[in-house]
Image (tube, helix red, strand yellow):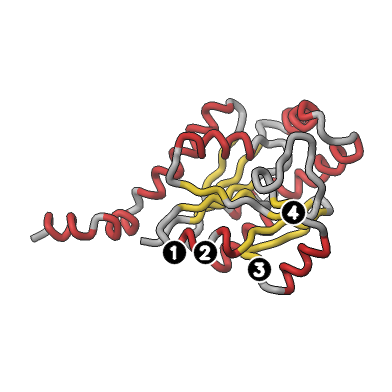
Amino acid sequence: MRGTLFIVAAPSGAGKSSIVNACLARDPNIALSISFTSRAPRPGERHAQHYHFIDAAEFQRMIDAGDFFEHALVHGDLKGTARQSVEPQLAAGRDVLLEIDWQGARQVRDKVPDAVGIFILPPSREALEERMRKRGQDSEETIARRLAAAREEMSHYHEFDYVIVNEIFDAAVADMCSIFTASRLRRDAQAQRHAGMIEGLLR
């Protein structure tokens, strides 16, 4: 049985990575695809744990070679998901989660129409700015640029199947875990997973 591909997107500062990491700790049946990026690591970030950090020339080489499942220019930096991180795991029946932006999500839907899209919103623009500043990792110029981009990013929420408002962190984590569970209980998925049992019940 083919695995389910989950796409999670959000504006910078909405808490996407924190929610995803909390859900992955609860659900061992989902593999997180580690994205590639051309930007330099931020304080505390590690290669192959948070991102695969490569330079722009290497990123372009991978684009030219067709190595990316999706890629996009995000906040001035290239980001992308390698095919090898997604396709073999889905084919083996493993669920895969992508943390990407709305541009990448569009590319993924073209390739995998039944991918499950989840968009995370902050409770307000003020809360979004406060969270960006609390990270203490970005300059004032970077924060201003990210806030300016946030409205455009959030305007694409309607392209996703589910929307989570990250006002109370624990509730947002529970909501995302519920989406994972509900997706696995869809009729088509259950019919494949339990084909023998269902056939026996209907004899």
For marks 4 and 2 on the same chain, the one whose residue lies earlier in the sequence:
4
Residue 107 seen: no
At label 2, counting other C-alpha atoms closer than 10 Å, the crowd grade (few under 14, some 14-19, many 20 or more) is: some
Q: Quadrant of residue 123?
A: top right
Mark 1 vs mark 3, CA separation in Å: 17 Å
For marks 3 and 2 on the same chain, the one whose residue lies earlier in the sequence:
3
Q: Quadrant of residue 172?
A: top right
Please state the horizontal and vertical placement of residue 77, each as a whole percent of the image: 81, 54
Residue 144 seen: yes
What residue is disc 1 on?
A: 91
Secondary element at tag 3:
loop
Circles 1 and 2 in contact, beta carbons < 8 Å: yes
What residue is disc 2 on?
A: 87
What residue is disc 4 on?
A: 37
Residue 116 or residue 97, whichever sits in front:
97
Please state the horizontal and vertical placement of residue 114, each as a whole percent of the image: 47, 61
Which residue: 76% across, 44% down? 150
